[in-house]
Image (spheres, grey):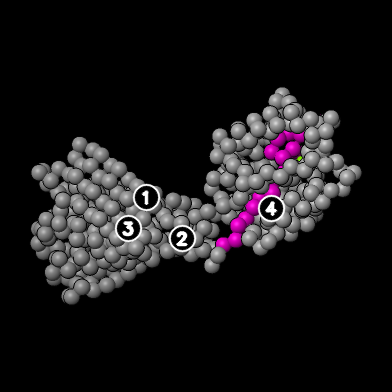
């Protein structure tokens, strides 16, 4: 489904910067931001998928009453300060007429804003933000809800407030980048370097099942290939460990780095399923993995091995791998496996682990953060 764009049509004077009594910001000395405006705009610009559009009436700009040379230095200084905070306007519309001219370009007229009226924008999910009744009227004319700042009241506005933080909260609930933009990949990149190991992980949860895995331990590579194949992630993993001592550090640190990459890729876990549960057999063995990206590490481990090693891996390290993963991914892992053949047992466990991850990281648009606490 094609997502329509969303815009915030933001007034300038009295909304982003303080409007002086003479209603003209015609010198640098008059440039002053409204409290909270920069912080709120920064959050909306960087973390949400609104396009920022400035729409401002500058009465008589370019006439003797308001020469352009007095307008631009303060305007450009304002834009520079905002840009330094990551706040960029996709477009800026300045109407220079006086009210008595009744120009169709002057707010609340929409003649400058025809680009937004052709169906490319979801106007019901866009907003006008301003400090005058004409801003609310602009919203009505565009078909957008409006937010009125600065003390006036108007029943047509969805919010009348003096507080930019209240605006940010209202709009944050509305448009979240990670879910609203389709196919935005969730990626974690971790480099971990100690005296014992050097590890680089590049994980794309939304991959195609492509793995490039070199840990130095053949059987470990084989197990991680199962994770890639059955969870559908892309994983580049390079491990240079102190294998001349033993496999312990390489396995443990790989699990720590991998868990960290998952935590990073999932971010605040907005819109994910959170839980996964999978059981699968491999010949005589049966493995069951239940997983919760709860934000709290926990491992329940019910497995018994008959041999000391499988391939190049000590079987005692299987528990350690999942414990370390749960510590850094901050997930609850509940793992049970039964079987006679240790190779079957551990391979089935990795496959069930992969399938449980695949379920838990699925996007479920519209559900928000999957916790009644609102945070995970
Ligand atoms: Mg204004």
- From the top left corner, tell me how far across and down residue 141 is, in percent: 78, 57
Q: Secondary structure at mark 1?
A: strand
Q: Which residue is mark 3?
A: 234
Q: Secondary structure at mark 2?
A: loop
Q: Secondary structure at mark 4?
A: strand
Question: In 3D space, how far apart are the residues under numbered discs 4 and 1 (Cα atoms)?
Answer: 33 Å
Q: Earlier in the sequence, mark 4 or mark 2?
A: 4
Q: Looking at the picture, tell me which residue is in the foreground, 106 or 294.
A: 106
Task: Provide the major secondary structure of the magenta segment.
Answer: loop
Q: Looking at the picture, tell me which residue is in the foreground, 4 or 205.
A: 4
- Residue at x-position 25% and y-position 55%: 212
Q: Which residue is mark 1?
A: 188
Could you classify mark 4 by the number of other residues whose Cα lies within 10 Å: few (under 14), some (14-19), or many (20 or more)?
A: many
Q: Earlier in the sequence, mark 3 or mark 4?
A: 4
- Residue at x-position 49% and y-position 55%: 178
Judged from this view, the residue extending furthest toward the bottom is 283
Query: In the visual, does 119 lie left or right of 239?
Result: right
């Amino acid at each position: 489904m094609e997502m329509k764009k969303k815009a915030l049509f933001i007034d300038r004077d009295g909304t982003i910067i303080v409007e002086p009594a003479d209603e003209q910001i015609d010198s640098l000395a008059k440039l002053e931001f409204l409290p909270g405006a920069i912080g709120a705009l920064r959050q909306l610009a960087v973390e949400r998928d609104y396009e920022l559009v400035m729409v401002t009436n500058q009465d008589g700009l370019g006439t003797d009453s308001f020469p352009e040379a007095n307008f631009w230095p303060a305007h450009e200084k304002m834009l520079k300060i905002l840009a330094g905070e990551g706040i960029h306007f996709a477009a800026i519309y300045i109407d220079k007429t006086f009210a008595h001219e009744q120009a169709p370009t002057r707010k609340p007229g929409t003649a400058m804003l025809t680009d937004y009226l052709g169906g490319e924008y979801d106007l019901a999910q866009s907003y006008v933000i301003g400090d005058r009744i004409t801003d609310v009227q602009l919203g009505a004319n565009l078909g957008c809800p409006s937010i009125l700042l600065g003390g006036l009241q108007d029943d047509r506005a969805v919010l009348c407030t003096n507080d930019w933080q209240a605006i940010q909260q209202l709009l944050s609930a509305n448009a979240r980048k990670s879910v609203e933009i389709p196919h935005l990949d969730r990626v974690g990149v971790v480099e971990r370097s100690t005296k014992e190991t050097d590890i680089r992980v590049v994980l794309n949860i939304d991959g195609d099942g492509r793995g490039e895995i070199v840990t130095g331990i053949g059987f470990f590579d084989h197990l991680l290939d199962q994770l890639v194949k059955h969870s559908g992630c892309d994983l580049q993993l390079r491990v240079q460990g102190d294998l001349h001592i033993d496999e312990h550090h390489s396995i443990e640190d790989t699990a720590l780095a991998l868990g960290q990459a998952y935590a990073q890729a999932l971010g605040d876990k907005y819109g994910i399923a959170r839980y996964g549960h999978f059981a699968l057999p491999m010949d005589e063995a049966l493995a069951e993995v239940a997983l919760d990206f709860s934000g709290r590490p926990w491992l329940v481990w019910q497995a018994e091995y008959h041999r000391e090693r499988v391939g190049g891996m000590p079987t005692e390290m299987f528990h350690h791998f999942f414990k370390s993963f749960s510590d850094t991914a901050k997930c609850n892992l509940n793992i049970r496996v039964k079987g006679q053949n240790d190779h079957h047992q551990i391979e089935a466990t990795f496959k069930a682990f992969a399938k449980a991850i695949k379920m838990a990281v699925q996007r479920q648009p519209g559900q928000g953060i999957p916790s009644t606490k609102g945070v995970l």
